[in-house]
Amino acid sequence: MPPKAIGPYRVLETLGSGGAGTVYRALDRRSNDEVALKLLSTGGPSLDDRAARRLAREFETLADLAHPNVVKVFEAGVHAGQPYLAMELIEGLTLRHYLDVSFNDLHTPTPASRGPLAIRRTADDDFGSEDPGASDDDDASEDDGTFDLNAFAEEAPSEDLASFHGAEDDSDSDGMLVVDPRRAAPRAAPPSRPTAPKVADLNRPERMGKLKDAMLQVCEALAYIHGHGLVHRDLKPSNIMVDDDRQVRLMDFGLAKFLADDAGITADGKLVGTYRYMAPEQILGEPLDGRSDLYSLGVILYELMSGRPPFDAKTPHELWRQVLETEPPPLLALNLHGDPQLARVAHRLIRKEPDDRFQTAEEVYEALSE
Ligand SMILES: Nc1ncnc2c1ncn2[C@@H]1O[C@H](COP(=O)(O)OP(=O)(O)OP(=O)(O)O)[C@@H](O)[C@H]1O
């Protein structure tokens, strides 16, 4: 049961939960404005009052940031020992759904047959089946108690083209993409499911235009937050939302900085971030800078262009091994007619050595604009 009120906010509904807490749609009783309210779960028992207030004060610094591509943080506070953040409420889709929906639009016979779309949550597990053997995580955590293996459990172990687009996969019980039940109906009748789209469908000009435009806006957001000395540390498709005007908002930036040290390790030894998108230096617990975010951006670009992530494994340890030691398959081998310029950008972003990547988000912006 969600709380009825959090500070001066009346909770209206739960929008979703992620690794760091739960997000509610809430009403600011002072102004009557609706906001997105993120109640952070700090992983253990409630913080003592002083610690929670200190964290909330640090979050307040995020309220000084203002950029059209960065979600606006209004204020921070403490509720029952847990810090919360009140943010601009974005009516839109996560980047992955935004691009999937554009694909589905092209395959839906009549616009009238489509129902309203609404995102309810965005863990990055929204594009493949959850590995039923989630005990992988348990295994790994026994091997190495250092890391928070829940982060891996929140991701799908793999992404294939069928699940990438699956028109009927978007109405799952998580409620992450709510569709007209008429569209969901074929789910019960597997023979009527559409065949998996061809890789070439990923290259449809409209979709590619949206992808490139969104990437440029993410670069602008990253340039801004890096310019303010922040590293996102958890850049992934569910932390990028696109509103109805196609304006991108980067979310959850900076939270990791307050919850962890320079290398992204929390006080209780957990790694902050989502494994699939983590740069090698992040996995190794080394100090991070903006180039680690650029690596994550490269994984996102690679995956949205090819329909699968550059590294794919069933266990965190295997994933880490691949990220640290192996080269990803050439993107254009997976998608023969992919945009070569964008593919080059993706590959350069996911180089293992930060020095070998683009060095700034501005450089990436320029390369994407060529
Ligand atoms: N400012 C916002 N406006 C509208 N919806 C939001 C906003 N912030 C978050 N949400 C929604 O709340 C859900 C949960 O967000 P949250 O940041 O807790 O999780 P996440 O990003 O999916 O995962 P994680 O916390 O592990 O990064 C998301 O699905 C998102 O759609």
Image (tube, rainbow, N blue to C red):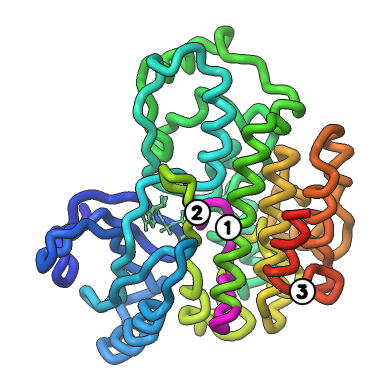
Q: Dot 3 surroundings within 10 Å: few (below 14), some, or many (20 or more)?
A: some
- For residue 19, above or below residue 168: below
Dot 2 falls on a residue whose secondary structure is strand
Which x, y percent locates residue 265? Answer: 58, 79
Give the residue number, with chain letter if any, for mark 2: 248
Q: Depth check: give the residue in front, 303 or 273.
A: 303
Dot 3 falls on a residue whose secondary structure is loop
The reply to whether discs 2 and 1 touch (Cβ–Cβ < 8 Å) is yes
Q: Amino acid at mark 1?
A: Gln
Dot 1 falls on a residue whose secondary structure is helix
The reply to whether discs 2 and 3 touch (Cβ–Cβ < 8 Å) is no
Q: Where residue 41 is drawn, which disc sits there?
A: none
Give the residue number, with chain letter if any, for mark 1: 217
Q: Is residue 236 magenta?
A: yes
- For residue 115, above or below residue 41: above
The answer to which of marks 2 and 3 sits earlier in the sequence is: 2
Q: Where residue 359 is drawn, which disc sits there?
A: 3
Which x, y percent locates residue 330? Answer: 88, 46
